[in-house]
């Protein structure tokens, strides 16, 4: 795998792959492709005619097939030349599979079993063949069902902390960082989606927005309020100019697969070198939205218990991320080119290095709170809605849950100093239950 | 030229150029190459045997030839596979000419006649053929001679402001910025020089450092003082993570050619997308060093008058840069993706956009003061010394001039809040004349 990783990074075809023209694969043709790959064929076992194929596409963009043979299974994911959920109307450059592959290969040495193993990448078909995760389910579905994941917070914290430090100037040589930046700066199609769907559309009249009628006053507020809009613009500017570390770029509860014992981060196709707080804030944003949706998923005591578990996850993730970030930065020897070892050699220097790293961490955590807010807003009045709210059938109840989350998000954008630590944020959550549909609500 | 620009950007050979293997050119062979380029041949006129060639290499890295024919002249600059001034000991990837060419082509639409016109780029020979500047001289030599350049401050301010805004998220679309970042992130050989020679070596025992015996106590202070070293490290981290705009990367008085009427910025081979304050601070750093050297270049009243002229240049540059930066950012329509027009449409939004841009400018000006300090330090105890000091023959006098500049630089690093505007910096200059060789001097 380590040898293969370097070819994944360089976008080279694996030796076994004969070049073939791009075409959209279906359940039958994906079997034909996999049957031509000796390593995959050996992994599945038996005759290809006996393999079972399931189309399990769940996200917005790609085809995903699970293929099982007598000896094992694999997951085959293909980039499509359009947005899957908006096929006829939204063409999309399909090269994202290259970036997902490069991202996975870049992080594999650091995150290990917290991500699925890559087996094969076909750069012509833009097809990734990887470990099939079973019995893992999408975290979002588990949260909606009110399940508990005792490993989740620590595992995601470990993943994000490793990625955040190892690919930053705190641990990586300048040349490695420049190569990451040069490579992922080419991930334009998906980044144009991010910069527009997250930071632009929700604050404008965009045909892509999906706004429940009850939330129209909220949407009007987002389009009108200078404080809210300018906070969103500042975050967009930070997203575009702060090349701190390699981001997953889409780290929400639909990009994490779980069992009670295991956690796997998937779907790195939005990879980008940007502000470290972006992934941190995104993960928490989806926990926060799950929290606001919860009373409409479950009754009374059950909802309260599920909410308490989500709160614990938020605090545990934040705390573990900060602790592991500082530990990994302290362990990284030699450190990266950002804070050269030579400048911090004596005990006073070592203390100063720790202070600078702590300030860097505090700064990225402030960024995270802002990005969290933008992620909540884009999932409620923007194009890509989330199941946590969509499963609430009653439109009035759904809008109330969404408006409460919007109310928190706008407070985070406009009054960030009220949320200087994660305890303050978690303590504030219940106040926003009183907001309901009123965009003027002040907790 | 505008069509040619796009091929310069893409590193494509100009159609007229037959591919040829790289070899180091001398005065004879450069004529052979130019004679094979119809456009250049027409520009020079006459028979190549009648052309006059002068080897005028002056910088640290490259070959430069001026070639004159009966009808006109050109400048031919070739990257060498080593550092010219340290030929036997320091190999250096020669691809820097590609980045210089791309940089020039990228900025040409904005800076116009403030840079020489490119005529031809040979990507095999890494040879740039450009406008010969005559009777322009290197600004540094003019400053040493005490000449006055009434256009200098406004012209350099215009150049830096155009580059700083037009290639930033304030004016450029996200995709253009990403392409700049992807391209110039590959300029590794020269960037490794920058990050080490500027931010590392002067604070360590490096064999590349050149330290006058009288400055050894100063060098020891730089290696020991945690405040100074950590400030330099923070600036290194900012240089590596703050991708605000396309930088010249080496904008000192040796990279500017002048007459009293004209100003031309040359030598963009250190181009890099980084913190905008870097170029701003670099230019001022070299004016500041000229100021400290001046009493040892000229006597009494003449030195005082030359110093006053330098002070005026510093203030005029800073003021004009800030004014032009704000004007260009306000004029840029549509603005870049950083501060989307949609978020600032009404009068309150327009005011807020101005406030955000002013905060962005203030932040980059704070960065500039820090980078200024690191640029002074690296030119006095580092590898690449400057003529302003080297022309002072008496080693004691030279060291005193250098120590005074070092003393200011360390104050800028450690007490930046004392220099909140350029007037405070200029007003402080004379105090550091009293520092002389004492690293413990406190003004």
Image: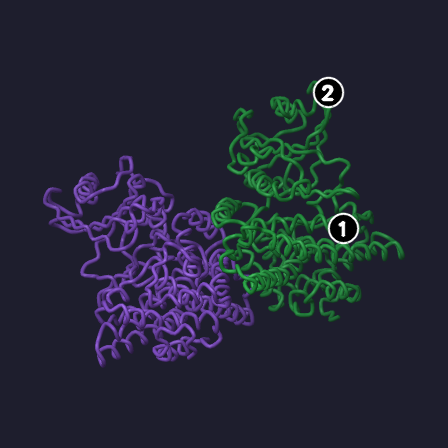
Chain colours: A purple, B green
Image position of A307 (left or right of B177) = left
Q: In which quarter of the image is the C terminus of chain A?
A: bottom left
Q: How many marks?
A: 2
The residue closer to the viewer here, B425 or B84, is B425
- Identify the residue position indicated by label 1 in the image: B388
B194 horizontally vs A390: left or right: right
Q: Position of residue B125 (x, y in %)?
A: 57, 31
Q: Judging from the image, what secondary structure is the residue with disc 2 in?
A: helix
Q: Give the letter of the chain under mark 1.
A: B
Left or right of B363 in this view: B300: right
**Residue A197 in view, yes or no:** yes
Front: mark 1 or 2: 2
Q: Residue B50 carries which label?
A: 2
Chain for numbered disc 2: B
- Is the same chain shared between marks 1 and 2? yes
Q: Position of residue B128 (x, y in %)?
A: 61, 34
Q: At 19% from the left edge and 40% from the top edge, which residue is drawn? A: A29
Which quadrant of the view contains residue A329?
bottom left
Using the image, determine if residue A391 lies above or below residue B124.
below
Q: Where is residue B388 in the image (x, y as percent from the top left)?
A: 76, 50
Residue at 48% from the left image edge and 74% from the top image edge: A415
Q: How far apart are marks 1 and 2 (CA)?
A: 37 Å
Query: Splitting the image into 4 quarters, where does residue A298 fall?
Result: bottom left
Q: Earlier in the sequence, mark 1 or mark 2?
A: 2
């Amino acid at each position: 795998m380590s040898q293969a990783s370097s070819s994944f990074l360089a976008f080279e075809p694996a030796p076994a792959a004969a070049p073939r023209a791009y075409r959209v694969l279906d359940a039958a043709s994906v079997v034909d492709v996999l049957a031509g790959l000796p390593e995959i064929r050996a992994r599945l076992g038996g005759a290809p005619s006996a393999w079972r194929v399931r189309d399990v596409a769940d996200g917005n963009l790609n085809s995903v097939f699970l293929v099982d043979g007598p000896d094992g299974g694999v997951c085959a994911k293909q980039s499509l030349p359009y947005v899957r959920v908006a096929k006829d109307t939204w063409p999309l450059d399909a090269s994202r599979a290259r970036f997902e592959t490069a991202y996975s290969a870049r992080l594999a040495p650091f995150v290990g079993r917290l991500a699925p193993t890559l087996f094969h990448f076909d750069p012509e078909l833009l097809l990734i063949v990887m470990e099939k995760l079973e019995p893992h389910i999408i975290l979002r579905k588990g949260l909606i069902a009110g399940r508990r994941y005792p490993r989740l917070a620590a595992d995601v914290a470990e993943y994000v902390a490793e990625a955040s430090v190892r690919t930053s100037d705190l641990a990586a040589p300048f040349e490695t960082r420049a190569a990451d930046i040069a490579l992922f700066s080419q991930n334009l199609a998906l980044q144009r989606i991010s910069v527009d769907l997250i930071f632009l559309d929700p604050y404008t009249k965009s045909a892509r927005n999906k706004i429940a009628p009850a939330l129209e006053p909220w949407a009007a507020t987002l389009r009108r309020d200078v404080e809210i809009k300018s906070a969103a613009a500042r975050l967009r500017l930070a997203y575009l100019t702060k090349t701190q570390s390699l981001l997953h770029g889409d780290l929400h509860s639909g990009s994490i697969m779980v069992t009670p014992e295991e956690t796997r981060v998937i779907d790195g196709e939005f990879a980008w070198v940007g502000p470290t707080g972006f992934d941190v804030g995104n993960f928490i944003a989806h926990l926060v939205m799950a929290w606001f949706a919860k009373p409409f998923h479950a009754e009374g005591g059950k909802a309260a218990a599920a909410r308490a578990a989500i709160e614990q996850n938020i605090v545990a993730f934040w705390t573990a991320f900060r602790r592991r970030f500082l530990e990994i930065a302290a362990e990284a020897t030699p450190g990266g080119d950002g804070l050269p070892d030579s400048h911090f050699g004596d005990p006073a220097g070592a203390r100063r290095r720790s202070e600078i790293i702590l300030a860097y961490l505090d700064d990225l955590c402030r960024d995270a709170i802002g990005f969290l807010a933008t992620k909540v807003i884009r999932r409620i009045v923007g194009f890509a809605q989330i199941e946590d709210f969509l499963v609430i059938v009653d439109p009035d109840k759904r809008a109330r849950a969404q408006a409460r989350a919007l109310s928190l998000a706008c407070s985070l954008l406009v009054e960030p100093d009220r949320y200087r630590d994660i305890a303050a944020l978690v303590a504030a959550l219940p106040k926003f239950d009183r907001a309901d549909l009123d965009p003027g609500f002040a907790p």
